Amino acid sequence: MAMVDEPLYPIALLIDELKNDDIQLRLNSIRRLSTIARALGEERTRKELIPFLSENSDDDDEVLLAMAEELGVFIPFVGGVEHAHVLLSPLESLCTVEETSVREKAVDSLCKIGAEMKESDLVDSFVPLVKRLAAGEWFAARVSACGLFHVAYQGCSDVLKTELRSSYSQLCQDDMPMVRRAAASNLGKFATTVESSFLSTEIMAMFEHLTKDEQDSVRLLAVEGCAALGKLLEPQDCVARILPVIVNFSQDKSWRVRYMVANQLYELCEAVGPDCTKTDLVPAYVRLLRDNEAEVRIAAAGKVTKFCQLLNPELAIQHILPCVKELSSDSSQHVRSALASVIMGMAPILGKDSTIEHLLPIFLSLLKDEFPDVRLNIISKLDQVNQVIGIDLLSQSLLPAIVELAEDRHWRVRLAIIEYVPLLASQLGIGFFDDKLGALCMQWMQDKVYSIREAAANNLKRLAEEFGSEWAMQHIVPQVLEMVNNPHYLHRMMALRAISLMAPVMGSEITCSKFLPVVVEAAKDRVPNIKFNVAKLLQSLIPIVDQSVVDKTIRQCLVDLSEDPDVDVRYFANQALRSIDAGAVAQS
Amino acid sequence: MWKQILSKLPNKKSSKNEHHHRGSHSSSSSSSHASTSKSNDNGVKKQPIHSQTKHERSTSSDVKNPKSSNNNGVFTPYEALPSFKDVPNTEKQTLFIKKLNLCRVVFDFTDPTKNIKEKEIKRQTLLELVDYVNSANGKFSEGSVQEVVRMVSANIFRTLNPQPRENKVIDALDLEEEEPSMDLAWPHLQLVYELFLRFVASPETDTKLAKRYIDQSFVLRLLDLFDSEDPRERDCLKTILHRIYGKFMVHRPFIRKSINNIFYRFVFETEKHNGIAEFLEILGSIINGFALPLKEEHKVFLVRVLIPLHKPKCLQMYHQQLSYCITQFVEKDCKLADTVIRGLLKYWPVTNSSKEVMFLNELEEVLEATQPPEFQRCMVPLFRQIARCLNSLHFQVAERALFLWNNNHIENLIMQSRKVILPIIFPALERNAQKHWNQAVHSLTLNVRKIFQDLDPELFKECLAKFKEDESKEGETKAKREATWKRLEEVGMRKG
């Protein structure tokens, strides 16, 4: 109780801390605003802390950002929803700072608070705040205002609503492109709260104005609005008013706008419905697939599968497939790469016969592409085509592609292909795998890049899981055991790594008979790194093997290692010994 | 006032520009001659020409690619027109317009084997046009102005090739460090820009008439081109925009406003633009011409546009030009020094050392023009920052900060206010003297320390005593802070 007698204490502390030269300390104290508020109690938080914060918006942006975030969850500390309005003032000033991230966070927090406020409080304090910001002299305030209308609008009187709509309309025609961009990107959100009678009149007028903006940066944001507004309008209104805009945008003179249409295509199709998609958007999409600008083709190519799902196979074959053929030999590798990453998905849509007739040649040509990315993208989706036509038709082209990627000079490419090996193995079957890929898998174990060796060891484990321990005993284990004698210590270490990964899959019997003797032998290696890895490995084997084996073999080996001259070896050996003891205690 | 600046500046610029043009021009003409003569033997296939109605140049180099055939215009024979000296004076203007029309056709330069003959015809025609505009006597008619602007628009307003997104490419590591990408169509573009520059600059171009065609939307599209990756193009644009700014008084506020919008977008949204340095160079000469006292509008520009331009990561690309603009302001009105210095402090880099060195360079230039009253207004936060710089582990930052004492004017400012400044930076100096890893920083620190010690041994002693006291209490202060917070939390828990 003694603390409560010191009236100004928590605020004084905050003020003191916020004066500190060290930004980390200032940040820490802002992050603990809730602590201060709790200590102050609700009333004094409202009367002292919040006013203080309202005046303290001159700090580093990082501190302001933290403040904006903290205030968003501050309602409980000021005494609940009925007092939420006191939080608006500090956030309002944060909405006007220059730094974008601070403003955005402040708007977020205001939306959160506004969503909880009572309608009458909204009208009394939130709406005036939005109006003030919207009329702000500096663009920062007006940009922030755009993100708040959807919260303010609900629950207003008709007069106020009219006022808010006309204010938003002004923001759509603001002198500064920054503000128009903000208005364009928030229009969809605002529209969801507006009554449908105003939707097709006032909101659509604002939208149409934005779609004709001279700045492409504004128009491209309006593209997103198409989908959002389309969902709100009656279907016939949507066809009459949104569809022409989309078709226009797909031929915009700015490639960025066309890119956006290509990117948003699926959402746009959803908005106008299947019939218009078939009649009006197919030609638009075909144009985008054949656009002059590679960026647009990249975006369009990436949507081929999703778009075709909306069509029937006949339309897809008639209109889209010819473009796909062209794209598969596009001059930009990025276009081909984007196509390769989705094209496998077309197989189920087209069905077996069409796939064999039309798609297979494309798969094959992409599999021979000069850029590894393209080939990898095809291989990564192999399962999809397997379901439709089986792997046989592809396998002849597949193998050279895999082998080439497996030996690519970029290690990231090698890494990517290793990750697909288990998938390939499951799709190709044991026979094919043994002949062609087995040797590669062991070769990777000795790659000169660590990440590849690590991935290779992991791959052996996954193969053992896929094909079973009997197969592994025949095809993997002998080679791994042999590697333990490799003259290079890094390779010996990799063999141990593979053993530790495979042991749980192979089970107790094989571990004891095959792995353990080799590991115990490795404990006598001359390289300390091998020895302490043996200690770690032994520790990981404890739960797999019988207690008798632990007591007989593992413990002895670890005791020897715990007397090693090397400090690290001793450390890991002792750690393993402790875990044996802990296990014994737990059992007894 | 304005005339003065403009008469000074363009001279410098145009001479530089001409030199530049002549240099690259001769090389481009010789190379294209070589290619023409070579290909003439092979008998070049005539290929359809892209008509000027097409929005964009085809970017695909693949002939098989249907995209390039998509936009082929109607084939028209492309033939050279008679030269100006071969027609009577009365027909020259008609010929001028005809030649302009001929040059509206845009060729695809991605394939150097395409349309070689036509490209050469257009190049020659453009050269003749440049000559004609240059030596024109008698005002250009409205028709001529319109056609010049149409021809220029058809050629220069195109989609700037977006940078392919190399970050996805595996080969990115092997690519050479960011070579600026050169526009393949430059042999034509250069001449079009040259022609337009001559046209804008020509005394025979009537501003009242020309502003109907060189209108706001034209200016806006011209500004968009500053994002070009080709430095040669940006250089031409810079000269042209500067001329337009000088000549078309009506456009001045609009141009300034539009450039500001580009800056806002760059600073607050994208941080990507290739032409910031060029814009700032133009603004630098505009600021240079501001009349005194400075208008409020221009001060707002300093605070809301120029100072925030210190924020983006790629400051290095335009720092020199920005720094020039800023110091111009301070030199014109030394009362602004305080505002500028606080602005620099607001955007002071936290981890980017090379940017920090740039800030220190700029700071020195600003301080050079700063008078004691303004200096005293901002010295406390300023020297807190400088103390941090002194202790920077990056020796260039620490060294650069210590060099401030080499500047007489700045040293005087500091020494006048040593009672405030020394206590702030003393711990930093002491820490450097004790344990900075870099030899140069170490010895420079000792020098600065000695300056203070010699000048005011009393103060120095006080600071040293305070430093020792604080150092011994450091752990205690920290523990106390933590205890306070803990107690505060307990109070909160009890209440909650």
Image (cartoon, coloured by chain):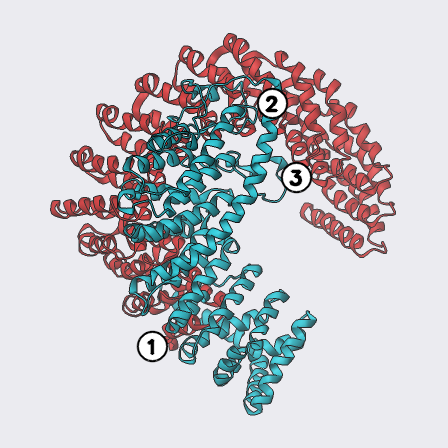
Q: Which residue lies at the image location 61% right of the left edge and 25% below the top edge?
A: B37
Question: Mark 1 highlights which residue?
Answer: A7
- The chain that appears red in the image is A
Question: Which percent across, then down, holds residue A288?
Answer: 42, 25
Question: Which percent across, then down, holds residue A452?
Answer: 70, 36
| Chain at tag 1 | A
* Residue B17 visible in the shown view: yes
Both marks 2 and 1 on one chain: no
N-terminal label among 2 and 3: 2
Question: Which percent across, then down, holds residue B363?
Answer: 49, 68
State how far apart marks 2 and 3 are (Cα): 34 Å
Question: Mark 3 highlights which residue?
Answer: B174
| Residue A347 numbered tag | none
| Amino acid type for the residue under numbered disc 2 | Ser
A362 vs A454: above or below: above
- The chain that appears cyan in the image is B
Q: Residues within 10 Å of mark 2 (few under 14, many from 20)?
A: some
B198 vs B437: above or below: above
| Chain at tag 3 | B
* Residue B108 visible in the shown view: no
State how far apart marks 1 and 3 are (Cα): 66 Å
Both marks 1 and 3 on one chain: no
Question: Mark 2 highlights which residue?
Answer: B39
Report the number of discs. Answer: 3
| Chain at tag 2 | B
* Residue at disc 2, secondary structure: helix
Q: Which residue lies at the image location 68% right of the left edge and 36% below the top edge?
A: A411
User: Which label lies toward us, 1 or 3?
Assistant: 3
Picture quarter containing residue A337?
top right
